[in-house]
Amino acid sequence: MKLQGKGAFLLVFLAVMVIAPMAFAEGAAAGGEERYAGFYSYIALGCVVGLGLAAGGGGIGMGAAVSGAVNAMARNPGFYGRIFTNMLIGLALIESLVIYTLVVVLLLLYANPFLG
């Protein structure tokens, strides 16, 4: 499948995922938490997509960092300690971004800050 076909498939899939909850939603009484029932499904979908993107981006970044560090250590073994220390600090910072995303996702899913 060509790249354009994959992009079109992804666009259609996302459109269906966004439109489907509205199409199958039932009318609810105005007031209370029933009014926000569809809104919570969008929050959950956004949280899942956001956390997946953060974890994937963090994994790609960690792979690139470790690859560069291993190449640097292989070329200059005398600086192994400095390179390894800097690599660990960089990996910790990358992982902290993913953990911050997880904290935001858990707040959105369980604290319900939109209820006021």
Image (tube, grey):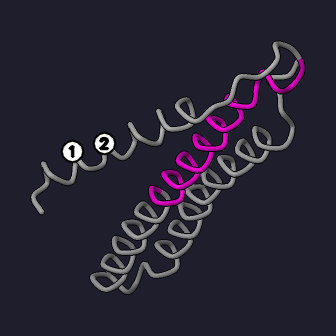
What is the secondary structure assignment of the residue under circle 1? helix
Residue at image coords 59%, 50%: 48
Q: Quadrant of residue 110?
A: top right
* Horizontal side, residue 12 vs residue 103: left or right: left
Q: Is residue 17 above or below residue 51?
A: above
Three-letter amino acid code at the position of disc 1:
Ala
Gap in Å between the C-alphas at discs 1 and 2? Answer: 6 Å
Boundaries of the magenta span = 32-57
Front residue (pair 72, 31): 31
Label pair 1/2, CB-CB below 8 angstroms: yes
Tell whether 107 sits left or right of 87: right
> Which label was assigned to residue 12?
2
Label disc, if present, on residue 83 of the rendered structure:
none
Residue drawn at the location 15% of the way across and 52% of the way down = 5
Q: Position of residue 109 (x, y in %)?
A: 77, 43
Magenta includes 95? Answer: no
**Left or right: 25 in relation to 70:** right
Q: Is residue 49 above or below residue 62?
A: above
Residue 52 point in image, percent of width and height = 53, 55
Dominant secondary structure, magenta: helix
Image quadrant in which the N terminus is located: bottom left
102 in relation to 15, above or below: below
Q: How many labels were placed on the picture?
A: 2
Q: Which residue is mark 1?
A: 8
What residue appears at the point 60 percent right and 55 percent down from the top-left corner? 93
Q: Quadrant of the C terminus?
A: top right
Label 1 neighbour load within 10 Å: few <14, some 14-19, many 20+: few
48 to the left or right of 6 = right
- Give residue 84's position: percent from left, percent from top: 51, 76
Label 2 element class: helix
Amino acid at dot 2:
Val
